[in-house]
Image: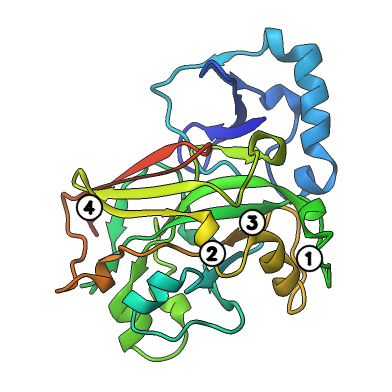
Amino acid sequence: MKLIRFGEMGREKPGVLLEDGTRLDVSGFGSDYDEDFFAGSGIAKLRNWLARQGASSLRVRESVRLGPPICRPSKIVCIGLNFRDHAQESGMEIPKEPVIFFKATSALVGPNDPLVIPKNATKVDWEVELAVVMEKKASYVSRETAMDHVAGFALHNDYSERSFQLERGGQWVKGKSANSFAPLGPFLATKDEIRDFNQLGMWLKVNGEFRQRGSTSKMIFDVPALVAYISEFMTLLPGDVISTGTPPGVGLGMKPPQYLKAGDVVELGIDGLGESRQEVVDYR
């Protein structure tokens, strides 16, 4: 099943995307895709509801905006330097343990919403990433049972302002959390939709030119290892997001470095998880 949310920013309704591309409004199900939905076996209940009520559900026009496929989660946990070649291009050591940082949930936007350059920003960068969404609470879980706690996967662009992140002291979260810095979607694919999350091709273009091409097979720490590791240090709640790191090809690693400016267009995709597109605009 592919979960979508659609409508005006801040007033999104829940929906599903069918195999033929049809979008269904499932607001009649009675629950948005939030922590309570995932914790209450919402995916299974929605699947059963669709079998009974899906035929009578309203269709959603393709012209209607897509929002992020989940409501604002309790946290977005990001993993840094999880691809060896990305660590190398960034001039940093290969991590012996996952590098964890946070991204503010207020950065979450729809997959095709504009990317807004923050005030005083000079080095806005791109990062195509596989996002994992939790279904069950996870605390001190094992690698072997980690996937039992996962709802599914989504496409994420982990935007960064490198000067805030690397030159202003403190933690990376400062360079990761501006409004619009976490476009998620177009949909959340439940686990059964993705045959092998360890073999997903990833790509990103800037103004039509490929900047990143990679595969989740190149991760240093795979999804089960990350879920288990993070759960040692915090409780992952239903609906929480883990963004699992990016392959090489970011602007920081180019010689000379290249960063985004107003008018640029970023397009990205992951096998089985669709594509997204963000036009870059100045802060107003």
Q: Nearer the viewer, residue 86 or 279?
A: 86
Q: Inspect the image, locate mark 4, and give the three-letter code of the amino acid beneath it.
A: Val
Q: Name the residue under label 1.
A: 143
Find numbered disc 2 in the image and state the secondary structure of the residue it sits on: loop
Q: Kindly indicate whether the residue at mark 1 contacts the one at mark 2 (C-beta within 8 angstroms).
A: no
Tell me the colour scheme of the image.
Answer: rainbow
> In front: mark 3 or mark 2?
2
> In front: mark 4 or mark 2?
2
Q: Inspect the image, locate mark 2, and give the three-letter code of the amino acid beneath it.
A: Met
Give the alpha-carbon distance from disc 3 to disc 2, as whole Å: 24 Å
Task: Locate residue 136 relative to residue 155 in the image: left or right.
Answer: right
Find numbered disc 4 in the image and state the secondary structure of the residue it sits on: strand
Task: Locate residue 262 relative to residue 225 in the image: left or right.
Answer: left
Residue 165 picture quarter: bottom left
Q: Mark 2 points at which residue?
A: 219
Q: Name the residue under label 3.
A: 73
